[in-house]
């Protein structure tokens, strides 16, 4: 492996992004179809990739006086959008055009311009069990003697796709599964493989896809809050096969805003007495989350952020009694156009109370698609980067997640601006550039 010196630090060389990048999406619903249609629309020059850091973001190098801020995609060797090839799995047979029309995120005029491309992408049969997603019942589903047999079928799908492209990444954009906790079966590769043959109920379909991908040395991202890659077996496989993993639960609407506002209150030492968050949404995701067992998985993911950001153990006078509530209500008329309300009861000097109201009329999948694109491109970069490929969790991608994964014993960083700095400094680091600390004393020498 070649090593070169640049900017004072040694970096091992990153393999170039040569050839086609295959993206296999599990669950070709609202997020997946908005991602795929969006990438094609951008490739055809019909629209801009707004919201995507890899496509629109810049990165400052050196001092502010150097005026050197290249585009991220010109700075690190990312796959080009032109080289991405999509495929995936779903429990319904609809091709991507039909699924996108059903999801009603993009309007018909937009879809009509790329209809033949979308129609050509047809999902492969899925690994699915209604026990894990109560509100769905699918017809386009693999059959097998046991879970090991199903895993082997997914591995065969990945192997076949690998023959048509140069590199592969798998993204879970499937429905939220019921709340599960790790058990003995998740503690090692050997225990998990025995569990697959024994049909262990702690092994959900999402874990079968993750196992198959990591076994094949393919990076895996988990866009939903399920227990999927945050397990010792997956970390072991990931490190062993140099297949980076990242998750979980795309940070798109309400939690995105929460992880911007809460750090601001803490930075100014303002107290928070209560934070009430409620949502209405009417897409299939909303229908799935209407089931209490799937909602519990999402609730855990959404509730965690405030405790970590506000650190009540360090600031008991400000945050010890914080009352935090999160509600999601299924309301079909809104479709994918969610509305999220936050009522925040804060207090200031001498304890005087104040209130903040946020009403975010957002579009769920419009916010999620660019995140999904960035994750796929950055995971592929990580797999080609010697300093990142065998780390297991890619904590530098915390920026994109409601529940970022970390090494054992570390608390996750939820503050969006710490996450953004961590991501950009990781890119500087792997490229041998100086890190930016924002100290700035040198300008006053
Ligand atoms: N859109 C957002 O802002 C956002 C944010 C965070 C997380 N998420 C999560 O992303 C996921 C996708 O969201 P969406 O709005 O696209 O939902 P969706 O319901 O439109 O799409 C999910 C798709 O997954 C399929 N599916 C379910 N189980 C499957 C399996 N085992 N194998 C293959 N396919 C399967 C369903 O048939 C469906 O087509 C959800 O879990 C959601 O909670 C979305």
Image (cartoon, rainbow, N blue to C red):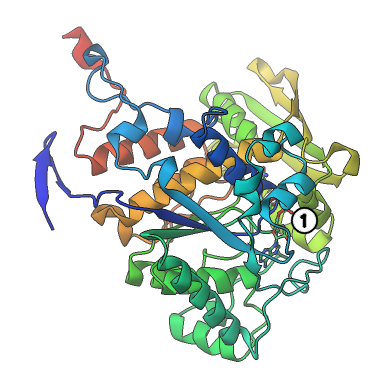
The residue depicted at 43 percent of the width and 36 percent of the height is 54
Q: Is 120 left or right of 273, judged from the image as shown?
A: left
Question: Residue 61's spot in the image, x, y percent?
Answer: 26, 25
Q: Is 41 left or right of 135, judged from the image as shown?
A: left
Q: Is 314 left or right of 128, judged from the image as shown?
A: left
The residue depicted at 70 percent of the width and 58 percent of the height is 175
Q: Can the viewer see residue 336 in this picture? A: yes
Q: Can the viewer see residue 253 in this picture? A: no
Question: Residue 197's spot in the image, x, y percent?
Answer: 58, 90
> What is the crowding at mark 1: few (fewer than 14 residues within 10 Å), some, or many (at least 20)?
many
Of residues 293 and 356, which is closer to you in this image? 293
Farthest residue, direction top:
444
Farthest residue, direction front:
116
Q: Quadrant of ligand 1?
A: bottom right
In which quarter of the view is residue 182 placed? bottom right
Decide: is 46 above or below 328.
Answer: above
Q: Secondary structure at mark 1?
A: helix
Of residues 315 and 307, which is closer to you in this image? 307
Residue that mark 1 sits on? 295
Of residues 426 and 171, which is closer to you in this image? 171
Decide: is 262 above or below 365.
Answer: above
In which quarter of the view is residue 112 placed? top right
């Amino acid at each position: 492996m070649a090593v070169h010196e640049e900017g004072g630090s040694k970096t091992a060389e990153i393999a170039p992004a040569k050839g086609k990048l295959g993206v296999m999406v599990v669950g070709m619903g609202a997020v997946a179809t908005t991602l795929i249609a969006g990438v094609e629309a951008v490739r055809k020059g019909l629209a801009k990739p707004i919201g995507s850091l890899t496509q629109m973001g810049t990165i400052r190098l050196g001092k502010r006086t150097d005026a050197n801020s290249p585009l991220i995609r010109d700075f690190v060797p990312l796959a080009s959008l032109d080289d991405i090839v999509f495929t995936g799995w779903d429990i319904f047979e609809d091709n991507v055009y039909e699924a996108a029309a059903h999801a009603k995120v993009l309007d018909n005029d937009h879809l009509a311009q790329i209809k033949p491309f979308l129609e050509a992408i047809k999902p492969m049969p899925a690994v699915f069990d209604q026990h894990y997603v109560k509100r769905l019942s699918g017809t386009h589903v693999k059959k097998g003697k046991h879970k090991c047999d199903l895993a082997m079928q997914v591995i065969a799908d990945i192997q076949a796709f690998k023959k048509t492209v140069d590199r592969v990444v798998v993204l879970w954009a499937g429905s939220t599964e019921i709340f599960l906790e790790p058990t003995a079966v998740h503690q090692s590769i050997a225990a998990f493989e025995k569990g697959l043959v024994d049909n262990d109920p702690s092994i959900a379909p999402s874990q079968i896809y993750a196992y198959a991908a990591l076994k094949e040395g393919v990076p895996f991202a988990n866009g939903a809050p399920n227990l999927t890659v945050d397990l010792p077996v997956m970390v072991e496989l990931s490190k062993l096969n140099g297949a980076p993993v990242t998750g979980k639960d795309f940070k798109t609407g309400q939690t995105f805003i929460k992880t911007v506002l809460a750090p601001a209150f803490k930075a100014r030492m303002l107290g928070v007495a209560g934070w009430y968050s409620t949502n209405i949404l009417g897409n299939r995701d909303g229908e799935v989350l209407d089931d209490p067992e799937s909602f519990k998985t999402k609730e855990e993911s959404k509730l965690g952020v405030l405790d970590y950001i506000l650190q009540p153990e360090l600031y008991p006078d400000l945050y010890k009694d914080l009352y935090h509530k999160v509600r999601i209500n299924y309301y079909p008329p809104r479709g994918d156009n969610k509305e999220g309300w936050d009522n925040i009861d804060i207090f200031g000097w001498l304890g005087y109370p104040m209130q903040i109201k946020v009403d975010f009329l957002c579009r769920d999948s419009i916010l999620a698609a660019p995140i999904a694109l960035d994750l796929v491109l950055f995971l592929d970069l990580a797999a080609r980067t010697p300093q990142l490929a065998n780390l297991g969790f890619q904590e530098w991608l915390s920026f994109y997640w409601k529940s970022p994964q970390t090494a054992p014993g570390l608390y996750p960083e939820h503050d969006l601006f710490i996450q953004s700095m961590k991501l950009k400094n990781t890119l500087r680091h792997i490229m041998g550039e100086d890190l930016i600390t924002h100290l700035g004393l040198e300008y006053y020498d």
